[in-house]
Amino acid sequence: MSTVETLTSSYTWTLKPKEYVELAKPRISTMVLITVTLGFLIGSTQTTDWMILLHTLVGVTLAACSSNSLNQLIERRTDALMPRTADRPLPSGRLAPVEVALFGIFCGIAGITYLFLNVNAAAALATLATLLIYVGVYTPLKRVTSFCTAIGAIPGALPPVIGYVAAGQSLDLGAFSLFVIMFLWQFPHFLAIAWLYRQQYHAAGLRMLPGGIPQPGITGFMAVGYALALLPLSLLPYHLGMAGPTYFALAAMLGMLYLAYSVRFMLSENRNNARGLLRCSLIYLPILLIALTWSHLAA
């Protein structure tokens, strides 16, 4: 079957708002918008321009809808092979590929253009880079090499940087500190997910870190390594003068907690410890970023 035939099969013009909302992955998109907002507040020097923040969130929302939609378009066949994703709009047949393609392309163009016209070129380019790396590099690499996880961590780390430059800041050490925290945080988080669903990923032909059905201890060992690297680098905003001693103390405690859960998982790789590490990661990040934002604004 040709690409055109594949995209146009089962095509209808029926309006399906519930399916499009599901396609946009609202929980993930909401997390992206929160990190963009916190990055914007950290990048605001004296007063916060709330209208620029609103414009930023509108543009990023459209771009997030685009990246999530196009990702699912590319992965519709592998999604159909995994129980955790088989009920998504595309593999379940509730949306046709052409509908998703048009929706994703429209949202992407609209979002980048909106940011360029209403925010600034830096925010638009950072968002474009996020979209292109996620859809054009990370997604296809998932079937080729486990190195895709490291590539995927790049667009995953850019949302607070988008907010930071949208507030008028440059790509300085402050932007780097936000990026590196987000970048390193993702690895224990995704390694826990990859271990929990390792058999499904393997059966679908997806080469997520640590790749295939890993040897015992490998996934936990990698999680510990990244948690160790994150601990000192999460203190970088304090050393750059972006936050005060309260942030330093809280970041150190959170880092040690994240490391402890990673070590526990390494010592005994089981579903309970993997889920514990995953829950810890979901607690760690919002508390850390909110503490950084509060400490920065209070300074």
Image (spheres, rainbow, N blue to C red):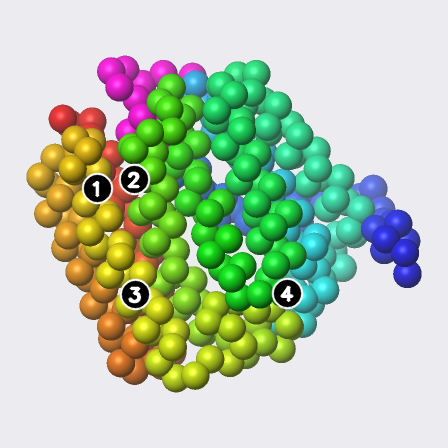
Secondary structure at badge 1 equals helix
Q: Which residue is mark 1?
A: 236
Q: Is residue 294 visible?
A: no
Give the position of the C terminus as an image quadrant: top left
- Residue 112 or 19: which is nearer the viewer? 112
Q: Residue at x 90, y 61 (%)?
A: 1
Amino acid beneath label 3: Gly
Occupied quadrant, residue 274: bottom left
Q: Which residue is mark 4?
A: 143
Q: Position of residue 281 (x, y in %)?
A: 32, 58
Query: Which of the two discs, 3 and 2, labels the residue nearer the N terminus?
Result: 2
Q: Which residue is mark 3?
A: 225
Amino acid beneath label 1: Leu
What is the distance, in whole Å, between disc 1 and disc 2 at their CAs?
6 Å
What is the distance, in whole Å, between disc 3 and disc 2 at their CAs?
19 Å
Query: Which of the two discs, 1 and 2, labels the residue nearer the N terminus?
Result: 2
In reply to whether residue 149 is colored magenta, the answer given is: no
Left or right: 5 in relation to 287:
right
Left or right: 200 in relation to 224:
right
Left or right: 115 in relation to 186:
right
Amino acid beneath label 2: Ser
With respect to residue 285, does 56 lie above or below?
above
Structural crowding at the residue carrying mark 1, measured as other residues with C-alpha within 10 Å and reported as few (<14), some (14–19) or many (≥20) = many
What is the distance, in whole Å, between disc 1 and disc 3 at their CAs?
18 Å
Structural crowding at the residue carrying mark 2, measured as other residues with C-alpha within 10 Å and reported as few (<14), some (14–19) or many (≥20) = many
Q: Is residue 121 visible?
A: yes
What is the distance, in whole Å, between disc 2 and disc 4 at their CAs?
31 Å
Q: Which residue is mark 2?
A: 177
Q: Position of residue 15 (x, y in %)?
A: 75, 41
